[in-house]
Amino acid sequence: MSEAKLLRIENLKLHFRTTQGIVQAVDGATFDLSYNKAIVVVGESGCGKSSLAKAILRLLPRNVHTYSGRVFLDSTDVMTLGEEEFRQQIRWVKMSLVPQAAMNALNPVIRVGDQVAEPAMIHLGIKHDEAIAMARKMFQNVGVPEDFLIRYPFELSGGMRQRAALAMALVTSPNLIILDEPTSALDLLTQANIMNVLKRIKQDLGTSYILITHDIATSSELADEVAVMYAGQIVELGDTYRFFPAPLHPYSIKLMASVPRLRADQEPDFITGQPPSLIDLPVGCRFAPRCPSRFDKCDQDPPVINKDGRQVKCWLYV
Amino acid sequence: MSDGTIEKISESNVILQKSFSQDNVLLSIENLRVWFELRRWGFGHAGYVRAVDGVSFDLHHGEAIAVVGESGCGKSSLMKTILGLYKPIEGSVIFNGKNLVDLDTRGMRWYRNQVGYIQQDPYGALPPFMSVKRILEEPLIVGGIRDKTERELRTRKVMEEVKMFPVEDFTSKFPHMLSGGQQQRVVIARAMILEPKLIVADEPVSMLDASVRVEVLKLLRGLQESHNLSFIYITHDLSTVRYFSERVFVMYAGKIVEKAKITDLLRNPTHPYTHALLAATSDPDAKNAATFKEVPPGEPPSLVKPPPGCHFHPRCSRMIPGLCEVQDPPDFEPETNHFVGCWLYK
């Protein structure tokens, strides 16, 4: 274990109890993240990527069946902290979240400035006036005009609301921000703009990101590393420079081939079949039923192979 | 301006170029304006929302076109006017030689049989209390097909066309039991079942997962070719357009700013807004993270009070002072069949 890691996650599990059975939303996620880096978690809907965000931030619903594993943030084992300690020391202080559809997550009856200032008041115990001043500074950072502080969310466009939600995550200056589908509901030019803002913040403030998305093309704007998630498990982990040109896992290969490209003449392909239900998972490799290179060994759960510093959970590379 | 022939583009997977003659027009739109009146205190006039402001184009039999633009550019209003849901305040929609405004109730019923509509959100578009069979039979019942066996036959046929095999597994299912891709297939089947000549698809794949998106697009493309359908594909995603349509219209603030074949548009984009759209579209590439994107400043204008002259001029880096903010640019033709509404090409 190296000291320079901001976040280290070991064998994180989050299972939910439902009337149909146990949903294995996150099943043994392991990865780490250095300071001032961005990792993107990609996968299809229902692969457990949003649950991974919730598990890291410990924003759990009531029907949790299993919640285990270890999460180190700045080499503190945060899983040993009690709920109150976690709330006071970690959540929004050291890591914060921009939730999915953040543009609709703002309270419609509170002024945007007050909402952005609120985390600073609650988590850092700062007085209102000072917190508003911090919010003003964050608005400059994310490129929202200052007079929007006293506006209500409905007066802002989608892109501006998204920026406000980002300012809310930034106001306590955390080291780590989890972005859950930060641009999926936005227009193309607004998307590019938000990506620019995120890049600038990463450069200027040294923030790290966990970017959760299904949009690989847009995520390549920000990511240093890629984690591919399939049916609750991380099946491939590696840096973008090696991942994008040549993914290893058959699922990653298929997923990359399904991205329509503007600048390359490459007919996009699709993955046949559907991802398995997280309640009733196939035995062995979870991608095996859809995998073109399946063989006998795939009936057993594949180990995580370290291949030149990249990790892949597939029997092909043993 | 060249009036010679276009250079032949041979790109492996760009769809085949078809030739269309003038008499082959299915849908003709002339100088269409769809404005919505704003009311003050419920009765006073307070201006108009100029959702569609002077749009003209022809759509031929068996041709697929794409309309690309951001939200609020008027592409949905254009689509709904074509479907006959909005009345234009000026201009006309002419389908097969018949003007939409002249059609009476019976005429509209005929028209609705000729035009299919694929909605953006499949789950929202399917009634949750109806089985797939009911959903698909509904247009046939409304369309006046009384014979039950014929209805069953046609339901079956259309489900096979959208590749829902085996048909028996799906007929009794309800929308919530289907995956997103399957739901969208039901929506497509419903649009196809009356054997329309024209299909309007509003962002048909934007709600679907990346891995299913291409599958559904290919299905649509296959249906379009095998039935010789005319297709209007509305999207904000330029990267899927090239796999789908021959021509593309770029729309900004109620106007079509560029009309071209998709190959020409990608090879030689002309309008500054098209440039911006292309620059903002990413391909998965690790190098992207190292550079900032060039994005025009500001946001699309209010359609109530659009800027004078060219609607894009406040955001345009190549604006010509004294011209762009004064006069609305007409369509110029920098190369054959490539039209652009920009003063740079006069």
Image: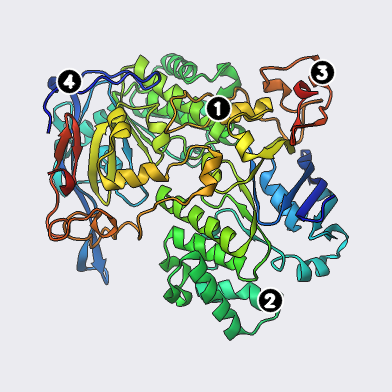
Which residue is at 31% across, 43% downward? B274
Q: Which chain carries label 4?
A: B
Instruction: Work out how far the residue at label 3 is from the one at label 1, CA to CA, in angstroms.
Output: 25 Å
From the top left corner, tell me how far across and down residue A131 is, in percent.
60, 80
The chain carrying label 1 is: A
Q: Which chain carries label 2?
A: A
Q: Is residue B245 left or right of residue A123?
A: left
Do the CB atoms of the residues marked 1 and 2 lie less than 8 Å apart? no
Helix, strand, or loop for circle 3? helix
Identify residue type, mark 1. Answer: Ala
**Cα distance between the residues tagged 4 and 1:** 37 Å
Question: x, y (%) of residue B105?
Answer: 22, 36
Label 1 neighbour load within 10 Å: few <14, some 14-19, many 20+: some
Mark closer to the chain start, 3 or 2: 2
**Mark before the other along the chain sequence, 3 or 1:** 1
In this figure, what is the number of numbered marks?
Answer: 4
Disc 4 marks a residue whose amino acid type is Asn
The three-letter amino acid code for the residue at tag 2 is Ile
Residue under pointer 2 = A122
In the rendered image, residues at marks 3 and 1 fall on the same chain: yes
Read off the residue under disc 3.
A297
Q: Where is residue A172 in the image (x, y as percent from the top left)?
A: 65, 71
Q: Label 4: how many residues lie within 10 Å, few (<14), some (14-19) or many (20+)?
A: few
Residue B234 lies left or right of residue A34; in this view the side is: left
Residue at screen point 86% across, 65% down: A82
Observer-nearest of A93 and B5: B5
Residue underneath mark 1: A257
**Which image quadrant is residue A102 in?**
bottom right
Q: Label 4 belongs to which residue?
A: B24
